[in-house]
Amino acid sequence: MQTGMRIIYDQDGEIVTSFLQGGLEPRKEIIKLEHIDLEYGEINFNIYRIVRIDPETKKPITERINPELTPEEKMRELEDQLLLLVNENTGGIL
């Protein structure tokens, strides 16, 4: 099996990233590149990974790395959900 390489570069020809392509499966043609900037700590990469970017909202779509929650995490998530629900019902205190 032969492995090719895809190189993504910017408008000035500087390489942004490159990666190997496994197998002989064709890839779709890239016709446009965009980017987003995330603030430090915006996503906890110990818990979540970014699986893609929503092209309309420009927001990352995340997936939990380990779907099993510890009891503390379950409690924290329930507290967060309760705070958001209270915030919505009271017209925004947060």
Image (cartoon, rainbow, N blue to C red):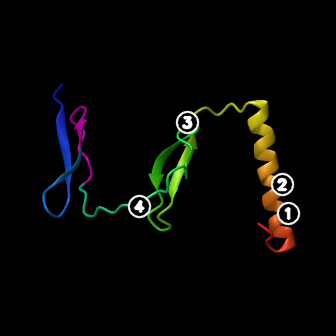
3 vs 60, nearest the viewer = 60
Kindly identify the residue that appears in the image at 78 percent across and 60 percent down.
84
Residues at marks 2 and 3, CA–CA distance in whole angstroms: 24 Å
For mark 1, what is the residue? 86
Kindly identify the residue that appears in the image at 17 percent across and 64 percent down.
11
Q: Position of residue 66 (x, y in %)?
A: 61, 32
Q: Are marks 3 and 4 in contact (CB under 8 Å)?
A: no
Q: Secondary structure at mark 1?
A: helix
Q: Is residue 17 left or right of residue 55?
A: left
Of mark 2 and mark 3, the one earlier in the sequence is 3
- Number of numbered discs: 4
Image height check: is 85 above or below 67? Answer: below
**Residue 36: image tag:** 4
For mark 2, what is the residue? 82
Q: Is residue 81 left or right of residue 11?
A: right
Q: Are marks 1 and 2 in contact (CB under 8 Å)?
A: yes
Q: Amino acid at mark 2?
A: Leu
For mark 3, what is the residue? 46
Kindly identify the residue that appears in the image at 47 percent across and 56 percent down.
38
Q: Is residue 10 left or right of residue 88?
A: left
Q: Position of residue 64 (x, y in %)?
A: 59, 39
Q: Is residue 23 magenta?
A: yes
Q: Secondary structure at mark 2?
A: helix
Examine the residues drawn in magenta and state their main secondary structure.
Answer: loop
Q: Quadrant of the C terminus?
A: bottom right
Q: Secondary structure at mark 4?
A: loop
Residue that protrudes farthest toward the left in the picture: 13
Q: Residues within 10 Å of mark 3 (few under 14, many from 20)?
A: few
Q: Magenta segment range?
A: 18-28
